[in-house]
Amino acid sequence: MDRHRSASTWLRYPWLVTPAALFYLIFFGVPLAQMVLQSFQSDGWTLESYITFFSEPAYWRMLGYTFFLGAVSMLIVLLVAYPVAWWLTTLSQRYVVGLMALVLIPFWSSGLVRTYAWIVILGREGIVNKMLMGWGWIDHPLPFLGTTWAVVIGLLYYLLPYMILSLYSVMNHIDRNLLLAARNLGASPASAFWHVFVPLTKPGIFSGCFLVFMLAIGMYITPALLGGPQQSTLPLMIALQINEALDWSLAASMSVILLLLVLVMQMLAGRYVNLDSMWGGSR
């Protein structure tokens, strides 16, 4: 019923979406079309850039590492954000406002500045190494920078607010009387939480994981500053092809491939995850 109503509203008032549609068409659709066309141009119309990408094992490894980095970051962010979001829902509103401001603090500073802060923290002369050496746990500085875990830590700090907000928005609307009903029926607190509360948070888990994963695989600054040659991702290679190799065709083809993979993942998610039933269960 709601779908038919929204569709009829759009048909009756098309001018409501016209400004947004024009904005996306001009500033997103046109550049996207130019990028697709550029991927087929290299001294004329050719598939040379795509052939180069698919025939080079190094590009495949880089693509696999990009998705691996996104998956690891997504799982760690979910494990960290879930208890935080649940804890926020147990507090009164006056405390939530202040604590939510702390969650949103990373949004108030530049991503470049935040990444440089982690260089100061994880560097050889950084805070972590000085603390470990001061406690006598290590004799010489450890090379934290230039590792996968340094990149994951930087991504975790950057992406954590997105997951917390996605989870909190769903958890805050769950009727806690359902947990009390489960307890009255003989369920333990842990069983009531796992079998009643967690399933109702699936919409927040799915939306948060999807958002965090998409942001992680497209991140450029964090892998570039905190990682090393072994932590090269596909966005880094795209920037390298544009700024140094000046191979715009190959860079465009890499961008198109990454975009297509994201679209395929979105289609699979919409196909195999019943969002309607998930939302219906949380109401």
Image (cartoon, grey):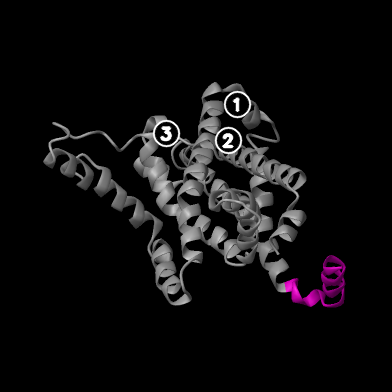
Label 3: which residue?
231
Please, what secondary structure does the residue beneath circle 2 have? helix
Task: Give the percent coordinates (x, y) of residue 109.
Answer: 37, 63
Q: Main secondary structure of the magenta part?
A: helix
Q: Residue at x 47, y 64 (%)?
A: 88
Q: Residue at x 25, y 48 (%)?
A: 121
Amino acid at circle 1: Thr
Mark nearer the N terminus (1 vs 2): 1
Label 1: which residue?
52
- Estimate the spatial distance between the alpha carbons at disc 2 and disc 3, rounded to whole Å: 20 Å
Q: In the picture shown, does residue 68 fall above or below 105? A: above
The N terminus, quarter of image = bottom right
- Estimate the spatial distance between the alpha carbons at disc 1 and disc 3, rounded to whole Å: 21 Å
Label 2: which residue?
250
Q: Are marks 1 and 2 in contact (CB under 8 Å)?
A: yes
Mark nearer the N terminus (2 vs 3): 3
Which is more toward the observer, 229 or 205? 205
- Can residue 269 be seen in this snapshot? yes
Mark nearer the N terminus (1 vs 3): 1
User: Which residues, given as a range, are shown in magenta?
Assistant: 1-18
Q: In the picture shown, does residue 171 fall above or below 225? A: below
